[in-house]
Amino acid sequence: MRGTDLEAAYCKARATGLAQEVDLFSRLLDRWFGGAVHSGRGDELVVFFRDVHERRTLDEERAAESSLIRAVLNALPARTAILEADGTILTTNASWNADPGPAGRLSAGERCVNYLEACRAAAATGDRDAQAAVSGLEAVFSGRAPSFSLDYARAVPGGRSRGETWWHMQAFPVDDRRRVVVTHTDITDRVTAEQRAAWQARHDHLTSLPNRVALHEAITEALAEDDGAGRVTVLYMDVDGFKQVNDSLGHSTGDLLLRELAYRLAHRTRPTDVVGRLGGDEFVVVARDCDAEGGEALARRFHGVFDEPFELAGTRLPLTVSIGIATSDPAHAGPEDLLRDADAAMYAAKASGPHRYLVFTPALRTVLEDRWQIASRLREAAANGEFAVRWQPVVDLRSGEVTGAEALLRWNHPQRGLIPPEEFIPVAEENGLIVPITRWLLQVTTAQATAWAREGLDLAIAVNISAVHLASGTLVDDVLGAVGDNGLRTTGLTVELTETSIARDPEQAVEQFSVLRKHGIRVAIDDFGSGYSSLSAVASLPVDVLKVDRALVAGAPPKRLAAPEAILRAVSALGSALGLQVLAEGVETVEQVDRARRVGCAFAQGYQLSRPLAAEHLSGLLEDSRRRTGRQLLPPPSAPA
């Protein structure tokens, strides 16, 4: 007995004279017994035992369960409290107790504090989150709602510069006595990630400017506020020659340029304007309270952004921009309409020359619809047999003989009749159709040249190539493929590109021209004198023929040039010195033919010599001449063609 709870109870009973309760475990019986210990006479010990095994076992189970619940509560990362039915805090977990202040909770609270009343006090100060919490908690306590949840923010102690934390509150009943569990979970990382993702979804990753989605929202909001007053203007900007920056200096430099441009544009807009990037080198400004005239003033301001060259990678880049302007009206019901028309105006401005701006008008819409119809029909024109080739003879001015012919594409539209090349070729270039059309043309023309050779006609042919085709990277394969398919000797073909086309990317031109010339195909620069190339620049290109622009031949060159005949003579002389054949194109009078011959041009073509002819017509004229004279001569201009 000594050293047991029974001895301790006996001693206390003798000292106090009061009976003491004690529980003892009998190893022999393997049961718990409870007893009342009395002090008897002298050293007597009087104990009345009763079996308490079931009660003691139940108490231990409850204690173990309570310990488990406490361990589970403390393991929860969320700040958790169990509330009595009146809102009083019954117990809390370690996370709740770690911070006695209100951070992360709508109100501070310790055990025995009425949390619901504390939230009501916060709600009375105007705290809307606390007001929502009170409403939700009351609904759960009353059984009107099975649960309640709320996301709310709390400022981090230390000031606004430290930011804020976000929390998710949940409340739900746990037993039939209407006790409620309340948890507060820190969701700051999740909310921050969601906010970052939402921001990234509406902003350009390179420049941090609003992207297409955000611009659509800005235009929609501006149109709603404008309410049809016609004072929402969209400016659509495209950097002229940006591709050359990427190709020559690399995409990393191009990215630096776009960032610098975004910075400059953002600092040239008004506080109410929104400047964004659609992608590539295309930027958009949404201007509120701005009519078309104001849009033009903004366009001039944005042109000023480009007055100062861009300093990038140790290089000064003088750049220009094309701008399209569209202003709201009843025809512009949504952001897509304004962006579409501003984009169209931008392309029209770019087509008229670099560094221009243009306001969209209904007339331009008509032109665009017409171009769209042309593009739609153009896709099937070759398959439908609507294309035709006409041949303009090239004449040797010394002998008068026809030595070749330039292939000129014509389109016989089933409804509109003959559409001139200057109307449908730009449309084909814009819509990605020029390369397949040129492939078709190369096949048809090389087949015709082979047929002429079989007939005994000695004619070299020339085919015009677009700058778009040059940039596509397939030009060499397309030309050599057509020559090989039709069995044409390569020296019988000349490809022509305009001076301005070559100037877009001289390095690419040199690379492809060199390959073509290695295979015997000749290269001609068309419309020489209409651009800004010098003969020294031409000398660095692998070309064979200079086709002098008709303006020089006619004696009416651009205003920047004087003494056209002297210039024409210099071009001819220097071209010949460089080993290039010089051809005067567009000769339309006897005087122009004489001028071309006088200054030393070796070849000429134009209406004075012959209009473009169908292949069979040209064949007939030359075969007739060969029978009569043994030479390939054209009839005199006065003779019927």
Image (cartoon, rainbow, N blue to C red):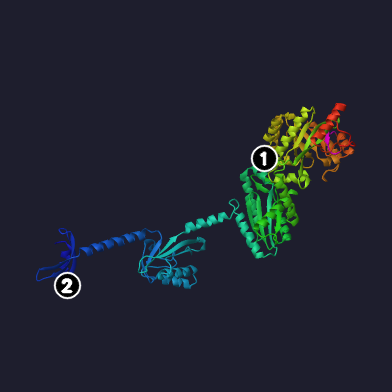
Residue that carries the numbered disc 1 in the rendered image:
472
Main secondary structure of the magenta stretch = loop
Using the rendered image of the protein, determine whether residue 334 is visible from the camera's viewpoint: yes
Q: Does the magenta run of residues contain 330?
A: no
Residue 293 position, x and y percent, is 74, 60
Task: Locate residue 477: give its quadrant.
Answer: top right
Q: Secondary structure at mark 2?
A: loop
Helix, strand or loop under label 1:
helix
Q: Residues within 10 Å of mark 1 (few under 14, many from 20)?
A: few
Residue at left offset 79%, top offset 35%: 615
- Comparing 426 with 167, the one in front is 426
Q: Residue furthest left?
A: 42
Residue mark closest to the camera, 1 vs 2: 1
Looking at the rendering, in which quadrant would you find the C terminus? top right
Which mark, residue 313?
none
Which quadrant of the figure has residue 613?
top right
- The x and y percentages for residue 299 are 71, 56
> What percent of the width, then of the height, locates residue 137?
43, 69
Q: Nearer the viewer, residue 36 or 213?
A: 213
Amino acid type at circle 2 is Leu
Residue positioned 38% across, 59% down in the render: 76
**How busy is the neighbourhood of tag 2: few (under 14 within 10 Å), some, or many (20 plus)?**
some
Find out whether the residues at labels 1 and 2 contact each other: C-beta distance under 8 Å. no
**Sequence-earlier tag: 1 or 2:** 2
Q: Which mark is residue 18?
A: 2
Q: Is 90 placed above or below 274 here? A: below
Q: Is residue 65 left or right of residue 18?
A: right
Real-space CA distance between mark 1 and mark 2, rounded to the nearest whole angstrom: 109 Å
Q: Which residues are magenta?
A: 600-607
Residue extending furthest top? Answer: 630
Residue 603 in magenta?
yes
Give the residue type that dot 1 points to. Answer: Ser
